[in-house]
């Protein structure tokens, strides 16, 4: 309690407890109000999400080719905190690698069978297949990592080079100066903590459903509130223990295991699956992605009936934004000793390549199995009857060593959510504590335990009572206030790029 930042910790913590309690007391009323608010925000501000996120990517590319790219984070004599391998492993495993496990096989089927009406693409056609693959590149490569890189890079410079506090208010220091260290900085930290818990609980909820689907596929255990609760407890227990061990032990070790398992699984699916088709659809999807990049990035739907972008693209941008501020604290902390150009390479370019590779292999395999190889039981039927969490296990059933690969995937899923939750719990706890600095980077274990339990409780409530729709809703609502913060953050980064001394 001595190190707790009370004005930052208690407002989001109490508001979350109130939200969970109200949802348990009156689920229907809570869902109705949240749905109405969610629909209003997406309808009125979808255009701003699309325009802003594209601008964040453009700013990152501008910085990469500017003189600022040569600046070393921490100063000319700073030594790296991590090796390059550990750095990329942690970056991949603590950001959107969590999401690709859940959506990498399920999402292409939605786009194949339900493309946006405004683009006049015939469902279940070759054009829809091409659109599906290119959309996966849009949702899982450059733009989401551009969001993270914008905030992470600015925080790294403010924290290490300008010696600003371990606070999200430091992101606005180039614009507002010393005002960010007072009440304004504490308000920003509190808002961002709430947004991250909403986004983190949504991601954890997707992981709980994926693991539950695996247990049902492998062991025949039907999903229930008790099973979902046991999965939640297991994930929360392990990631709290890992977070308590600190950055250079738990997270680094888990990420190293995790990234190797990712590559092993991807190589297996590529070699044993429809390799030639996967490579062809990957190349055509990339061509479609780059040919229609701006159209896809800025597509928002002009008619009320065309709500595809609200259900998918804008939902993703809101989700990434919910995670972004506190993820920026974590990614920025890793960058000590490397240049700005290297930061952009390791947080934008390399993760985007990994995301594209994963989507080509897993998305391409799923599309092939649905269209050409499973007429008696297409993958889309599995999606409709069993939910998105069961699609990946349907894919493995049609490949060699299905039991072994499904078991391996189940383990990777558990490890991935532990790793991602570990990193964000550490950042959330650091934001809630006083005295965090490059010389004393770890917050109290008690604060980590409290946030871990809180995130787990919110995630379990969502998946048990609201399902996948509740997960999407929480992500959207959590990301909305951060949209406006990130616009200011982008302006601050532009100011630093143009005048590093501002």
Image (cartoon, rainbow, N blue to C red):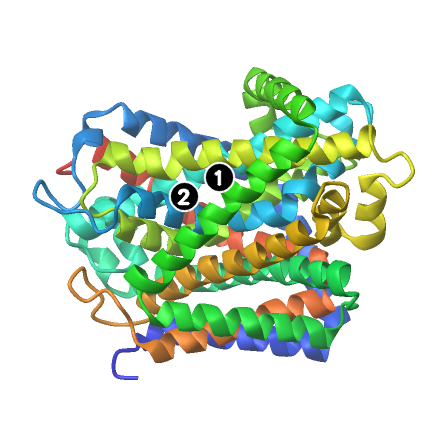
Q: Nearer the viewer, residue 76 or 49?
A: 76
Q: Is residue 63 above or below residue 466?
A: above
Residue at position x 64%, y 56% in the image:
407
Q: Which residue is mark 2?
A: 148
Q: In the drawing, what numbered circle is on residue 39? A: none
Residue with the most extreme left position: 77
Q: Is residue 127 above or below residue 156?
A: above
Q: Is residue 334 above or below residue 282?
A: below
Residue 491 image point, x, y percent? 32, 38
The quarter of the rendered structure image containing the N terminus is bottom left
Q: Which residue is mark 1?
A: 144
Q: In this rendering, would 313 be left or right of 384?
A: left
| CA neighbours of label 2 inside 10 A, class few (<14), some (14 to 19), many (20+) | many
What count of labels does the image hold?
2
Residue 466 seen from this side: yes
Residue 52 seen from this side: no
Check disc 1 and report its element: helix, strand or loop. Answer: helix
Residue at position x 48%, y 35% in the image:
354
Residue 149 image point, x, y percent? 37, 40
Q: Are marks 1 and 2 in contact (CB under 8 Å)?
A: yes
Quadrant of residue 135 within the rendered picture: top right
| CA neighbours of label 1 inside 10 A, class few (<14), some (14 to 19), many (20+) | many
Q: Nearer the viewer, residue 282 or 307?
A: 282
Residue 455 image point, x, y percent? 52, 69
Q: How many angstroms separate mark 1 from mark 2 (CA)?
A: 7 Å
Residue 137 image point, x, y percent? 57, 31
């Amino acid at each position: 309690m001595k190190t707790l930042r009370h004005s930052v910790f208690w407002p989001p913590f109490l508001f979350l407890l109130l939200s969970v309690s109200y949802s348990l007391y009156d689920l229907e009323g809570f869902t109705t109000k949240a749905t109405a608010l969610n629909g209003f925000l997406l309808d009125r501000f979808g255009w701003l999400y699309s325009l802003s996120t594209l601008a964040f990517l453009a700013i990152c590319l501008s910085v990469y080719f500017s003189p600022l790219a040569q600046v070393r984070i921490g100063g000319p004599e700073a030594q790296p905190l991590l090796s390059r391998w550990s750095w990329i492993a942690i970056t991949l495993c603590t950001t959107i690698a969590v999401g690709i496990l859940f959506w990498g096989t399920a999402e292409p089927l939605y786009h194949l069978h339900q493309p946006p009406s405004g683009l006049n693409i015939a469902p279940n056609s070759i054009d829809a297949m091409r659109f599906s693959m290119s959309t996966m590149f849009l949702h899982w490569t450059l733009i989401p990592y551009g969001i993270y890189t914008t905030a992470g890079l600015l925080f790294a410079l403010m924290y290490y080079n300008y010696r600003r506090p371990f606070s999200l208010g430091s992101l606005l220091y180039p614009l507002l100066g010393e005002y960010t260290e007072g009440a304004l900085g504490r308000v920003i930290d509190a808002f961002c903590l709430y947004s991250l818990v909403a986004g983190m609980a949504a991601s954890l909820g997707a992981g709980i459903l994926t693991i539950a689907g695996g247990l049902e596929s492998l062991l025949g255990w039907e999903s229930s509130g008790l099973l979902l609760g046991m999965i939640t407890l297991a994930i929360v227990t392990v990631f709290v223990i890992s977070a308590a061990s600190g950055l250079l032990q738990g997270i680094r070790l888990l990420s190293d295991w995790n990234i190797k398992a990712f590559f092993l699984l991807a190589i297996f699916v590529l070699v044993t699956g429809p390799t030639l088709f996967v490579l062809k659809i990957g190349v055509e999807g990339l061509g479609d992605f780059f040919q229609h990049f701006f159209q896809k990035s800025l597509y928002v739907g002009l008619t009320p009936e065309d709500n595809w972008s609200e259900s998918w693209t804008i939902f993703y941008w809101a989700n990434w934004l919910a995670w972004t501020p506190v993820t920026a604290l974590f990614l920025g902390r890793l960058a000590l000793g490397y240049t700005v150009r290297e930061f952009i390479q390791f947080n934008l370019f390399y993760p985007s390549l990994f995301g594209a590779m994963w989507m080509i292999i897993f998305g391409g395999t799923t599309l092939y199995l649905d269209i050409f190889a499973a007429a008696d039981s297409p993958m889309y039927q599995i999606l409709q009857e069993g939910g998105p969490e069961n699609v990946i296990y349907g894919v493995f059933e049609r490949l060699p060593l299905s039991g072994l690969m499904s078991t391996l995937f189940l383990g990777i899923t558990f490890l991935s959510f532990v790793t991602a939750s570990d990193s964000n719990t550490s950042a959330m706890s650091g934001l809630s504590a006083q005295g965090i600095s490059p010389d004393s980077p770890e917050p109290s274990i008690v604060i980590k335990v409290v946030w871990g339990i809180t995130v787990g409780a919110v995630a379990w409530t969502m998946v048990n009572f609201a399902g996948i729709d509740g997960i999407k809703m929480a992500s959207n609502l959590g990301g909305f206030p951060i949209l406006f913060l990130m616009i200011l953050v982008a302006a601050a980064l532009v100011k630093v790029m143009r005048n590093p001394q501002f």
